[in-house]
Amino acid sequence: MNVILLIFDSLRKDCVGAYGTPPWGAVATPHLDAFAAEAIRMTRVYPESLPTLPARRAIYTGRRVFPFRNGDFRLKGDFVGAPGWGPIPEEQATLAEMLQTKGYRTGLVADLYHMFKPSKNYWRGFDQWKFLRGQEQDPARSGPRLTDEDIEHWLPEQMRGRGQGRIEFIQRCIMNTLDWRHEEDYFAPRVLREAGLWLEENQDAERFFLTVESFDPHEPWLVPSHYLRMYQKGDSHEQVISAYGDVSELDPSLIARTQANYSAEVTMADRWFGHFMETVRVLGLLDDTTVIVTSDHGHSLGDRGYMGKRGYPSMPEVYDVPLLIRLPGARSAGVTSDVLVQHHDLTRLVLEVAGADVPDPMDGLPFLEAALSGNPGLRDHVTVGWGGAVTVIDDRWWLNCKVDGRGVLLYDLSSADPFARNCASEQAPVVDQLFAYAVEDAGGEFPEWLVDLARGAEDAPGCSDLAARTP
């Protein structure tokens, strides 16, 4: 049995046609939709920890990262993306290492530059790893610098005052891509072509495990014009970076351009996903390979007046992620399951379909049998950590608060518009019970430095004065 794990960074679930439509209109994903028709479609999947690197740690190890014990990293040459933004602990085996010991040939193809910084070790256990340079602030090039005219083209005036370093950010992003001429030069095409080449070059492997990490559709949203024309007619100012803040006062044309660029990048990634799956087909691998497609998180694009991703307040456009599992021969095609799943359960899934032993300890739980049988899964709730905030979700409720128990937001998922009203004040016992789940999942307590971080953060607008307590 071969296994392919493909992770798209920042792919919104509602931007995959098999799952739905985002508020601004349908996004074309014909290849992912065709794949979904042959796959098991999981509908309630959430991260374990966020953002980028904590999510990979959970997926790659099957171990909880929350509550970020020993996770206050300050590493040279890196920025503090969030608590837990560090290497995989040396004492934790990676999924690639687990399968390597079972005779699997392991490969990694990725353009997610955070994993390859000098302080990181996310390639541990791969017989071959390929890092495609140039995303975001990866120092792939040092010149030539952009002109003032170039900066004016790429960075609207309204976006320049939204945080330090935006001009330098766009300088690096565009400098890294100055020699692009054709669609094949863009990141998603490069990653998925290289992944196909790895399959060609490793046809002699008795069994393999290939991880494919596409940073697209993460910002900056750089796309060929022919994809943009699918979603926006006429000219408007270019807008390729995220605001990471309130955009209720932002020029609506900039929000529309952002949504169009994001949609275009999703469609481009979808096209090259189709190319990759065609390679899987022509190499005769469809009948003995499990292919898993997911995302680490989504991205708010004007939803509720916000653009970016954040852990507090948490929202489904960021936390609700797609998960499609195509078993060999498209076995169980068309099954849809609402079993609760988290990222670290994917480690368990890969080991299960590979017929490999599950090491102890392992926090990820099995869910495939329940999904196929229609039975309830082993989880009755999920806990997601991000910085000094925590989100707890069960069949009815969505709790989001700081780990010191303050700044409480509680949403009733059974209501027609769940996130329109915070009902924490009238549901104090529910708040306490869900917060107790978070404390239990954290191992009984939160690290003091994380509590201090939470105390220093502002409460979200509209939060309750109620403080969550453990019963």
Image (tube, grey):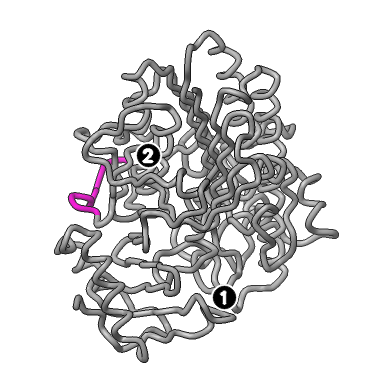
> Looking at the rendering, which quadrant does residue 431 occupy?
bottom left
Q: Is residue 3 in view from this perspective?
A: yes
Q: Residues within 10 Å of mark 2 (few under 14, many from 20)?
A: many
Position in image of residue 269 (x %, y %): 66, 41
Residue 289, which numbered label? Answer: none
Residue at the spot 36% in from the left edge and 24% down from the top edge = 99
Q: Mark 1 or mark 2, which has the lower sequence index? A: 1
Q: Is residue 424 left or right of residue 145?
A: left
Residue at the spot 37% in from the left edge and 85% down from the top edge = 424
From the viewer's side, name the closer residue of 73 and 334: 334
Select label 1 or label 2 by which is in front: 2
Position in image of residue 56 (x %, y %): 39, 43
Tag 1 secondary structure: helix
Q: Is residue 144 in view from this perspective?
A: no
Q: Residues within 10 Å of mark 1 (few under 14, many from 20)?
A: few
Q: Is residue 303 left or right of residue 348?
A: right
Magenta segment, principal secondary structure? loop
When the figure is inspected, residue 130 is found, relative to residue 22, above or below; the finding is above
Residue at the spot 74% in from the left edge and 32% down from the top edge = 182
- What residue is pinned by disc 1? 304
- What residue is pinned by disc 2? 348
Quadrant housing the C terminus = bottom left
In three-dimensional space, the C-alpha distance between marks 1 and 2, rounded to whole angstroms, equals 35 Å
Residue at the spot 52% in from the left edge and 53% down from the top edge = 374
**Amino acid type, mark 1:** Arg
What span is colored magenta in the figure?
A: 68-77
Q: Is residue 217 left or right of residue 458?
A: right
Position in image of residue 160 (x %, y %): 55, 63
Tag 2 secondary structure: helix
